[in-house]
Every structure is written in C-alpha cells, then in structure tokens.
Amino acid sequence: MNGEIEQMSNIVISARKALFDNKEIDFAFVTTPVNFKDDKEIYYVYELNNVLIAPSSYKNKIKSPTSIKKLAKYPFVLLNGSMQFREHLNDYFRKNSVQINPVYELDSSSNLLEFVKNDCGLTFIPIEMAMDAVWEDKCFIIDLEEKLPARYITFVSKKKVIHSNIQHLIK
C-alpha cells in the first residue's frame, strides 16, 4: 500500500480476505463473524447491538417477548446471502432450528429500515439505526426469547503491522 489509504465500502468479506491474501491491503475494519488466517491480528473495536424490528402495523399481531420460531411466518427483509451480517443471522436461525426465507434481499443495511417503515416485513438492524423510527412510531423493537449473539466491529491487521495513525483507536 505504500502509505496510501484506499476507501473500500460494501465489499463482502470474501473479497477483503482475498485482498489480504494477495498482500494488497494491510488492515481493514470488518464486522464479525471474522474468519481470517492465523497470520492476522483481530481487535474488537465496538459492540453492535442488533435488534429485530417490525412495522408499527404489526403491533397487534406480535407480542413481545416472543420466539423467533413464531415469527418465521412473517415476511422478512434481510441483507443478501453474501453479506457478513446475513451469515451471522443464518447461523442464528440454524442454531434455533428456524427457516427464514426473506421476501426481499438487499445489498445495503441502510435500506433495511426503509423497507420496514413501508410495511414490507421484519428485519434485524443495529439499535442505533432503529431508534429514530421507533421514537416516531414507524416501527417497534421485538424482544426475542433467543438472544442474538454479540457482534462487533473489528480491526483486522497483518500480525506485527499496526499503523501509528490508527493505533490509538484499538487500545
């Protein structure tokens, strides 16, 4: 990289792994789950608190807390299958023996909330993204009996390569 910083957004984890393996990048911010080779160091930077939200029109249909199994009959809007968060959710669904087939699959988490606000179904997003819409009564948070596993933003670096201009972020 020679000191150059290249912005990369919405690159699926497999592409980032390939860039690391080809020695095209030295570090990246990646959300968990992370599965890199042993020659990488992983630092947990920030915990993401993901919640399940539903359109306000579902308030009379869904009582909270509830089981994810009971919600499988409702439409879901999720990220597409190549996205890390979707992989995280698929693991959660498998562990809870539930089959979720989304009616919409999106390429960006920023669009998930808009689909819920427009009555298209349920979705999982970070609580920070949901709060304004919850306060405006455009959606509500469903408390799940089966808690989602923790998810983090991580800093992944080649071992022994920590750049001084970002070292303060991971301490």
Image (cartoon, rainbow, N blue to C red):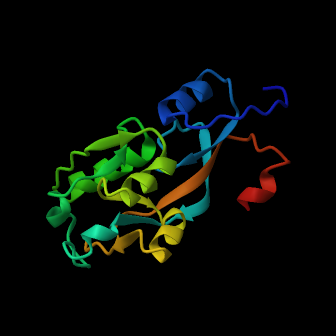
Q: Nearer the viewer, residue 79 or 24?
A: 79
Q: Nearer the viewer, residue 159 or 138?
A: 138
Quadrant location of the N terminus in the rendered image? top right
Label count reads 0
Where 17 falls versus 139 (above or below)? above
Q: Tell me residue 121's x, y (percent).
A: 29, 56
Residue at horizontal 14%, vertical 57%? Answer: 73
Where 83 falls versus 90 (above or below)? above
Q: For residue 11, which quarter of the picture?
A: top right
Q: Is residue 49 left or right of residue 39?
A: left
Q: For residue 160, which quarter of the picture?
A: top right
Q: Say if residue 9 shows up in the picture.
A: yes
Q: Is residue 69 left or right of residue 80?
A: left
Q: Tell me residue 57's x, y (percent).
A: 28, 68
Question: Seen from this angle, which residue lies furthest top?
Answer: 22
Q: Tell me residue 60's x, y (percent).
A: 21, 76
Q: Say if residue 158 shows up in the picture.
A: no
Residue at horizontal 24%, vertical 54%? Answer: 93
Residue at horizontal 44%, vertical 56%? Answer: 113
Residue at horizontal 74%, vertical 62%? Answer: 171
Q: Is residue 48 left or right of residue 103?
A: right
Q: Tell me residue 94's x, y (percent).
A: 22, 51
Q: For residue 161, which quarter of the picture?
A: top right
